[in-house]
Amino acid sequence: MEMDPPPKMLASLTITILMMMMATSVALASSDAAVLEGQARALLDWKASLDNQSQRALHSWGNTSTPCNWRGITCGTGMHRHPLVNKGIFLQGMRLRGALESLNFSTLRTLTRLDLSHNLLAGSIPRSIEVLGELHALLLQGNQIRGSIPLGLGNLTKLHSLMLHENELSGEIPSQIGNMSSLVTLNLSSNHLVGHIPCEIGHMKHLVALDLSSNNLFGKIPSSIGGLTELTSLYLYSNKLSGQIPRELGYLLNLKDLQLGINALSGSIPRNLHNLTKLTVLILWGNKLSGLIPQKIDYLSNLQYLSLGENILSGSIPNSIGNLTKLTTLSLRNNQLSGLIPQKNRLPFKFRVPESW
Ligand SMILES: *[C@@H]1O[C@H](CO)[C@@H](O)[C@H](O)[C@H]1NC(C)=O
Ligand SMILES: *[C@@H]1O[C@H](CO)[C@@H](O)[C@H](O)[C@H]1NC(C)=O
Ligand SMILES: *[C@@H]1O[C@H](CO)[C@@H](O)[C@H](O)[C@H]1NC(C)=O
Ligand SMILES: *[C@@H]1O[C@H](CO)[C@@H](O)[C@H](O)[C@H]1NC(C)=O
Ligand SMILES: *[C@@H]1O[C@H](CO)[C@@H](O)[C@H](O)[C@H]1NC(C)=O
Ligand SMILES: *[C@@H]1O[C@H](CO)[C@@H](O)[C@H](O)[C@H]1NC(C)=O
Ligand SMILES: *[C@@H]1O[C@H](CO)[C@@H](O)[C@H](O)[C@H]1NC(C)=O
Ligand SMILES: *[C@@H]1O[C@H](CO)[C@@H](O)[C@H](O)[C@H]1NC(C)=O
């Protein structure tokens, strides 16, 4: 036969449990405080690795008990409610000179934004960056960062924005990049990247802007890009891409800006590109495209900028171009086109040949 515990025992049990809970929460709180202090120390170590001028710019970085007040550092609530942990580093355009390798990422796992853009950082992106699993934005553009894109970036599955453009990155774009399934903006332009565009890029279904321009990429444009139906901007210009323009690009119905100029693309312009009725800019300048200009080009009724120059397009210039009432710039020069530009007086645009495109 079971008996209820006497009231006195119940009370002491409750107190014990309460005390245990308080002790746990104090322990958790102090563990978050310890995390913050470890983060402060890692940041100070990094500061010490920078040049003197950079260190002066970070003069507010000092007291390890108050890192949330340091310049460019933001904090937020940690795992255990009230204590603060380091959530963001915002140090753009401060002429900081040093390297990322000196930053101990393993202490900074709580970071959601890391913005070190437009500084003078050199060295490479350390492999250890893969531990920053909470990161939403990694902004390193406009530095002098070398080496290859680490495979471990593929682990950063919460990343929305990856900006590595205007650096000195080399090597191939790793296929693991496709694992960053939350990515909305990917800008790798103006580096020295080589190799093929990995077809895994087609896994990043939320991409809105994809810019791989001004690199040395070669091979075909993967047809998997046609699955990125949220894309509004696709820039692949100034590479060494060859083969046909995949007809799958005609599925990107949200596309506003398509720039494939200065490559070695061949074959004809896919007919279904006329489905891209939101296009305002279409630049295919400087390829080896042949065949006719599609008659239905006037379906692209929002076009403001159309550049098909420096190709080997033939046949007559379709009259329907005259229907593109929003066009301000048209370049068709250096093709094998015959006939006249459709009745110029019908064209609302100031006819000019752009300098660079
Ligand atoms: C940086 O500052 C330290 C101490 O102030 C000085 O000894 C050192 O020469 C400086 N280095 C440069 C490159 O100016
Ligand atoms: C660091 O900040 C704490 C809290 O504001 C303060 O008590 C302490 O004196 C400061 N230490 C130094 C060396 O300034
Ligand atoms: C980075 O920080 C961790 C603690 O979070 C430490 O174990 C490790 O030794 C540090 N690495 C370096 C290179 O200082
Ligand atoms: C990164 O991903 C790879 C493969 O998916 C895995 O083996 C590795 O443990 C991950 N690294 C981290 C730090 O989570
Ligand atoms: C990451 O990408 C690689 C190559 O695309 C793939 O083999 C691997 O399964 C992916 N890992 C995860 C965790 O999705
Ligand atoms: C990528 O960055 C460059 C340089 O800031 C910018 O001009 C370009 O518009 C960006 N690409 C996209 C698709 O936003
Ligand atoms: C795109 O264009 C093709 C013909 O070129 C047409 O058959 C197809 O239905 C169009 N698709 C959409 C989604 O409008
Ligand atoms: C487009 O242009 C063609 C040829 O000039 C013309 O026959 C046609 O009616 C125009 N369509 C529209 C919708 O204005």
Image (tube, rainbow, N blue to C red):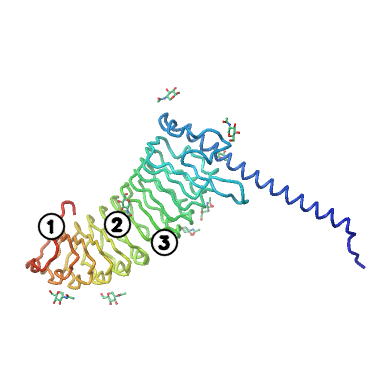
- Residue neighbourhood size for the residue with mark 1, other residues' Cα within 10 Å, grouped as few (<14), some (14–19), many (≥20): few
- The residue at which mark 3 appears reads as 204
Q: Amino acid at mark 1?
A: Arg
- Residue neighbourhood size for the residue with mark 2, other residues' Cα within 10 Å, grouped as few (<14), some (14–19), many (≥20): some
Say whether mark 2 is within 8 Å of ligand 6: yes
Given residues 169 and 281, the one toward you in this image is 281
Q: Quadrant of the N terminus?
A: bottom right
The mark tally for this picture is 3
- Residue neighbourhood size for the residue with mark 3, other residues' Cα within 10 Å, grouped as few (<14), some (14–19), many (≥20): many
Q: Amino acid at mark 3?
A: Met
Name the residue located 83 percent from the left edge and 54 percent from the top edge: 13
How far apart, in angstroms, are the residues tagged by discs 3 and 1?
38 Å
- In this view, 98 is above or below 108: above
- The residue at which mark 2 appears reads as 235
Element at label 2: strand
Q: Earlier in the sequence, mark 3 or mark 1?
A: 3
How far apart, in angstroms, are the residues tagged by discs 2 and 3?
16 Å
Q: Position of residue 114 (x, y in %)?
A: 45, 46
- The residue at which mark 1 appears reads as 352
Given residues 145 and 47, the one toward you in this image is 47
Q: Earlier in the sequence, mark 1 or mark 2?
A: 2
Q: Position of residue 344 (x, y in %)?
A: 8, 66
Q: Amino acid at mark 2?
A: Tyr
Q: Quadrant of residue 308?
A: bottom left
Q: Earlier in the sequence, mark 2 or mark 3?
A: 3
